[in-house]
Image (tube, rainbow, N blue to C red):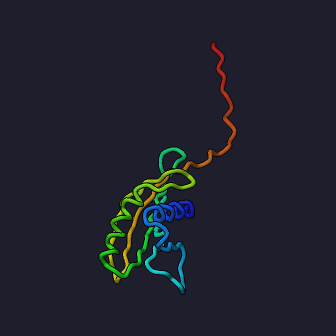
Amino acid sequence: MNDVIKNGIAEAIRRGFGDEYSIYADNVEQGMKKPCFFILNKKCVFERLLGKRAAVTYRYGIEVYEQDREKLEKMLVKLFGCMDMISTAEGKMFGRNMSFSIEKGKGNFEVDFRCVVMFEEEKSEYMEVLEREDV
């Protein structure tokens, strides 16, 4: 699911900002082209629900590199609209708990995506049936 959401985030950024910005999903040792976006999986929280279901919340960080602080702020604000709803191979997902900060010349945008998963039912034989005779 992690790769599915990362691809959805990358596509939403491409739609919102065009092809002039590079998008990276892994660490780049050399040759990083600025301005650019890095998509990082920060945290995954698994919450058991009633029945055979669980809610899984994926926390993503998007690092934004831009030299001009004013442009950087505009890019971060624009990400709110881009991450509001993303399209993935599994369907549409809504961004939640979005926030951003600027530290040391880079922008940090964070967003949660939540999905519900179903567990397979265990295959077991039923108990014997008890029949009663009326006396």
The front one of 84 and 60 is 84
Rendered position, 105 above or below 128: below
Q: Which quadrant, please, contains the N terminus?
A: bottom right
The front one of 108 and 115 is 108
Q: Which quadrant, please, contains the C terminus?
A: top right
Residue 106 image point, x, y percent: 37, 79
- The furthest residue to the top: 135
Residue 31 image point, x, y percent: 53, 85
- The furthest residue to the bottom: 30
Q: Residue at x 64, y 20 (%)?
A: 132
The front one of 21 and 109 is 21
Q: Is residue 9 left or right of residue 73?
A: right
Q: Quadrant of residue 108?
A: bottom left
The front one of 109 and 119 is 109
Rendered position, 62 above or below 54: below
Q: Residue at x 68, y 42 (%)?
A: 124
Q: Quadrant of residue 98?
A: bottom left
Residue 90 image point, x, y percent: 56, 52
Rendered position, 132 above or below 26: above
Residue 66 image point, x, y percent: 39, 79
Rendered position, 84 above or below 27: above
- The furthest residue to the left: 70
Q: Is residue 14 left or right of residue 97?
A: right
Q: Is residue 127 left or right of residue 102?
A: right
Q: Residue at x 56, y 60 (%)?
A: 4
